Image: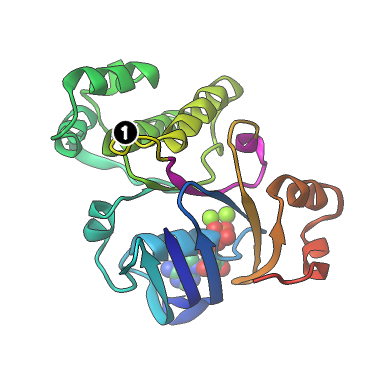
Amino acid sequence: MLHIEDLHAEIGGKEILHGITLHIEPGETHVLMGPNGSGKSTLLMCIMGIDAYTITKGSITFNGVDVTHLPIHERARLGMGIMFQRPPSIPGLKLGKMLNVISPNKKPEDVSEAVSRMNMEEFMGRDINLGFSGGEIKRSEILQMMIQDPHFIMLDEPESGVDLENIHLMGESIARLLQKNQRFVNRKNSGLVITHTGYILDYLDVDKGHVMINGEFKCHGNPREILKLIKEKGYHECLKCAKIP
Ligand code: ADP
Ligand code: MG
Ligand code: MG
């Protein structure tokens, strides 16, 4: 599904990722952990193809296609979807209009069902994310993802800024997004999820965890065990882990 080899990336002339190798197989969900500023969001941006980041070395292959230098819309067309840590507001573009644009092949009743599942009926006439609370932004992003229906789903701290009641809704919705692909019978989607708190792991079926420190992976393993280690002993403990490629 996703194969990243020795990825080096920079922004503003500064190298942030120093050789990341990551393989996510079809149907697998991986978890990315690590201290603030270590480069987790940068990795997701590079996978998605956000312009500001320059890949200086290495490659990203998605479903057999070398996407290392493809523009973002082509990656989206190939089935990648992302929920940013801080999604931008889009003044002038209504959420309802956006859903129409991304749902040409969706039945209207499926769109309505997703809108109601995310409790977003009242937001259809509002500009995307403008004046939305933290939790409303995340719900709106998940809703758009439900309509876009990507088969590789990247989520950057989906629980941050979300209250406890909505974490439950987010968790269940994300689990549902990952569980199956509506275009392919019997196929699970794949995912890459950044989390600090691990709350989201209560809802997801996850396969592998990776800890990034200063732009490098320092530790790989069972995500729940890694999280426990970090909570008990701190990220430094990960530096003692064996580095398994
Ligand atoms: P994380 O998501 O792990 O908290 P990020 O990927 O957001 O980390 O950031 C990694 C590093 O890149 C940080 O030190 C951050 O300050 C730096 N960075 C992000 N954007 C820019 C930029 N436009 N110019 C220079 N450095 C940046
Ligand atoms: Mg951060
Ligand atoms: Mg981040």
Which residue in the structure is indicated by mark 1? 182
Question: As displayed, is residue 166 above or below residue 71?
Answer: above
At 51% from the left edge and 40% from the top edge, which residue is drawn?
Answer: 158
On whether residue 32 falls in the magenta region, the answer is no
Q: Is residue 242 left or right of residue 5?
A: right
Seen from the viewer's position, the closer of residues 63 and 229 is 63
The answer to which image quadrant residue 224 occupies is top right
**Quarter placement of the C terminus:** bottom right
The region drawn magenta spans 188-201
User: x and y percent of residue 95 in the render?
Assistant: 24, 31
The furthest residue to the right? 233
Question: As displayed, is residue 141 above or below residue 12?
Answer: above
At 48% from the left edge and 80% from the top edge, which residue is drawn?
Answer: 14
Q: Residues within 10 Å of mark 1 (few under 14, many from 20)?
A: some
User: x and y percent of residue 230 in the render?
Assistant: 78, 52
Q: How many marks?
A: 1
Q: Is residue 86 left or right of residue 204?
A: left
At 24% from the left edge and 27% from the top edge, which residue is drawn?
Answer: 126
Question: As displayed, is residue 53 above or below residue 30?
Answer: below
How is this picture coloured?
rainbow
Q: Is residue 239 left or right of residue 169?
A: right
Seen from the viewer's position, the closer of residues 183 and 226 is 183
User: x and y percent of residue 113 in the render?
Assistant: 30, 17
**Quarter placement of the N terminus:** bottom left
Disc 1 element:
loop
User: x and y percent of residue 42 in the render?
Assistant: 48, 64
On whether residue 189 falls in the magenta region, the answer is yes
Q: Amino acid at mark 1?
A: Gln
The furthest residue to the front? 186
Indicate yes or no: mark 1 CB to ligand 3 under 8 Å: no
The answer to which image quadrant residue 212 occupies is bottom right
Seen from the viewer's position, the closer of residues 37 and 226 is 226
